[in-house]
Image (cartoon, rainbow, N blue to C red):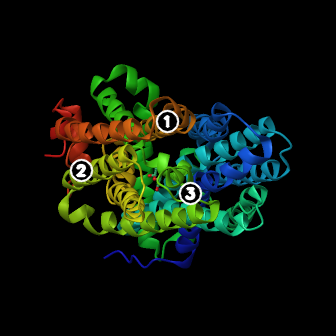
Amino acid sequence: MRNTDIVPMVWLSCALAAIAGLLFGMDIGVISGALPFITDEFDISTAMEGWIVGSMMFGAAIGACGAGWVSKSLGRKKALLLAALLFFAGALIAVLAWNPSVLIIARIFLGLAVGVASFTAPLYLSEVAPERIRGTTISFYQLMVTVGILAAFVSNLAFSYIESWRWMFGVLMIPAGMLFVGVMMVPNSPRWLASQDRFGEAREVLTKLRSSKVEVDYEMKEIEQSIEEEDKNQGWALFFSNPNFRRSVMLGIGLQIVQQFTGMNVMMYFAPRIFEMSGFQGTEAQLWSTVVVGLVNVLATFIAIGFVDRLGRKPILYIGFTVMAAGMAVLSGILAIGPTTTFLQYTAMTALLVFVTGFAMSAGPLIWTLCAEIQPLRGRDFGIGCSTVANWVANMMIGTFFLTMLDALGGPVTFALLAIVNLAFIVFTLLLVPETKGISLERIERNLMRGKKLRDIGN
Ligand code: BGC
């Protein structure tokens, strides 16, 4: 019988990776509150606003592209240290930014950081946590992203009283510093050490992370075996040689594009603007409402965590997309007739919250889970890397072009389009997404590699 007590060092390592999730969320959340003040100070065009928002996601896409290489060659620990430094630098440059171009550079730094962190932190978590708490730690990481968004919304509100968008960015230096100091204290990933042929060190580290020698021996053997497997074929080579792997990579990319095109980040980046359109006047009222959005986002994530292994992935996605479509349709309708009464204003706000609930209980956490589950072991890093990059590229398109689209088409049409897109995602899920509840990753891999239809690889 293997002794599987969880030693404190594991909790420390998990807590630390969770700080990376927190920074991810804060990076997403900070701009919605800062943007109105930035626009006032620099007197910029709508297109420039879009670039200020989108530059972070541009940096993140590049960061996520390079993250695989950085975390492989330098190791997970140094990759996270680099992310912490980039976060710190980005926040500092934003505090000092003397014109919009400098602010864009700051946002690119913040993006690079979040791109590296959003790839490396979950990977590090899955490599240091014992198997039986692995699922929980990944969900916890997702939860921390939403907590980070909420923290940024609250800090935005606080600093709005002194009208300082600079300090909204400045506070990011605190968690960045915590991440840096924290990473210095935790060990490197034993799996990475082993992949560098540093087996002695890997065993030493594993001894700190596990409670018995039996466990250490068992896991070392597993690591050695999986490294042998990995060496056979991986990444690009597998992508070019194996059409079945190409299918899972494309599905991962598709899933992340779907996640972003639900329009969730429209709410994350432009909530105050949407509240303004819905008749809520004054920055303070808009920022308070945005905090409520952040809170609902955190709370609804628990629904997903609670039901994902009971109801299954697909039913939750169907419910989520339907709820999101309903929220967008109601918002579009109210904007079409004009939010003239208090009743209509609050109905618009409720519609927005319904939409956010729909996302947080479904596509938010589930898409990340599915993207990891559908990739075969031999190409997992590569497959997850591709879908993470797709997430940020699609995110950038939303952040950069949404305002321009809103200007061109107007609120009612824009939100009606989002409602239709969410309905279309129900069909996407029906036709392409497998149900992966309660099935081993090895079985999914076998089905995929045998050429089963994507939607059937979980059967
Ligand atoms: C998405 C982010 C989004 C966040 C909102 C994540 O799953 O990838 O783009 O901002 O959820 O909670």
> Which image quadrant for residue 49?
top right
- Is the C-beta separation of discs 3 and 1 under 8 Å? no
Tag 1 residue = 406
Relative to the observer, which residue lies in front, 131 or 79? 79
Q: Which mark is residue 16?
A: none
Identity, as a three-letter code, of the amino acid under mark 3: Gly
Q: Which residue is mark 3?
A: 25
Q: Quadrant of the N terminus?
A: bottom left
Most extreme residue toward the top is 240
- In the image, the residue with mark 3 has its CB under 8 Å from the nearest atom of ligand 1: yes
Give the foreground label among 2 and 3: 2
3 or 1: mark nearer the eye: 1
Spatial separation of the CA atoms under disc 2 and disc 3: 25 Å
Between 163 and 147, which is closer to the camera in this rendering? 163
Evaluate whether residue 51 shows in this view: yes
Residue in the picture at 62% in, 62% down: 152
